[in-house]
C-alpha cells in the first residue's frame, strides 16, 4: 500500500509533493501515536505469549476469561478490535485514516460492545 500511495509522488515537483503532504498534517500525530502503541502492543504480546507458554493451563484459562473494566468483552477480543483499529489508522494514505472525533466514536463503540 505504501509503495502504491507514494508512487504518485514520483516525477512530481518537490514543492507540489511538500504541499500535498502538508495538507494531511492533522493526521501525523495520530499516525505516530498508533504506530508507537502498535509496536508496544506487539512487543507485549510476544512477551506475554512466552510467559503463558510457561504458565499452567489453569492460569491461562483464567486470564482469557477476564473482562475489561466497564466492558463485558473478553480481553483478547477487545485487544483484537483495538489492534484492527490501530492497523487501519496506520494506512499510508492519510485520507483513509479516521480523524480524532471518528476515532473516539469507534473506540467508544468497541468499548461498549
Image (cartoon, grey):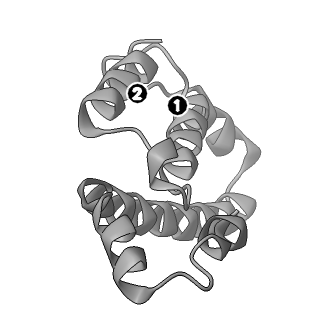
| Quarter holding residue 45 | bottom right
- CB contact under 8 Å: marks 2 and 1: yes
**Lower position in the chain sequence, tag 2 or tag 1:** 2
Looking at the picture, how far across and down is residue 41, in whole percent? Answer: 49, 60
Residue 57 in picture, x, y percent from top left: 75, 44
Q: Nearer the viewer, residue 82 or 103?
A: 103
Find numbered disc 1 in the image and state the secondary structure of the residue it sits on: helix
Locate residue 99: give its quadrant.
top left
Q: Residues within 10 Å of mark 1 (few under 14, many from 20)?
A: some
Q: Is residue 30 above or below residue 101?
A: below
Q: Which residue is mark 1?
A: 78
Q: Which residue is mark 2?
A: 68
Residue for point 42% across, 77% down: 17
Q: Which mark is residue 42?
A: none
The one of 65 and 79 positioned closer to us in this rendering: 79
User: In the image, residue 4 lies at what x, y percent?
Assistant: 71, 66
User: In terms of depth relative to the viewer, which is nearer, 55 or 25?
Assistant: 25
**Residue drawn 66% across the image and 43% down it:** 60
Query: Looking at the image, is mark 2 or mark 1 nearer the viewer?
Result: 1
Q: Secondary structure at mark 2?
A: loop
Q: Where 112 sits versus 95, above or below?
A: above
Q: Is residue 88 left or right of residue 30?
A: right
Q: Is residue 40 above or below residue 85?
A: below
- The residue sitting at 54% across, 71% down in the picture is 43
Amino acid at each position: 500500500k505504501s509503495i502504491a500511495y507514494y508512487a504518485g509522488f514520483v516525477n512530481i515537483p518537490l514543492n507540489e509533493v511538500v504541499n500535498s503532504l502538508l495538507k494531511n498534517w492533522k493526521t501525523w500525530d495520530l499516525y505516530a501515536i498508533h504506530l508507537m502503541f502498535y509496536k508496544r502492543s506487539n512487543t507485549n504480546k510476544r512477551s506475554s505469549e512466552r510467559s503463558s507458554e510457561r504458565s499452567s493451563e489453569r492460569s491461562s484459562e483464567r486470564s482469557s476469561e477476564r473482562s475489561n473494566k466497564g466492558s463485558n468483552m473478553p480481553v483478547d477480543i477487545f485487544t483484537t478490535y483495538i489492534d484492527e483499529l490501530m492497523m487501519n489508522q496506520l494506512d499510508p494514505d492519510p485520507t483513509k485514516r479516521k480523524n480524532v472525533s471518528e476515532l473516539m466514536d469507534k473506540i467508544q463503540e468497541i468499548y461498549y460492545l
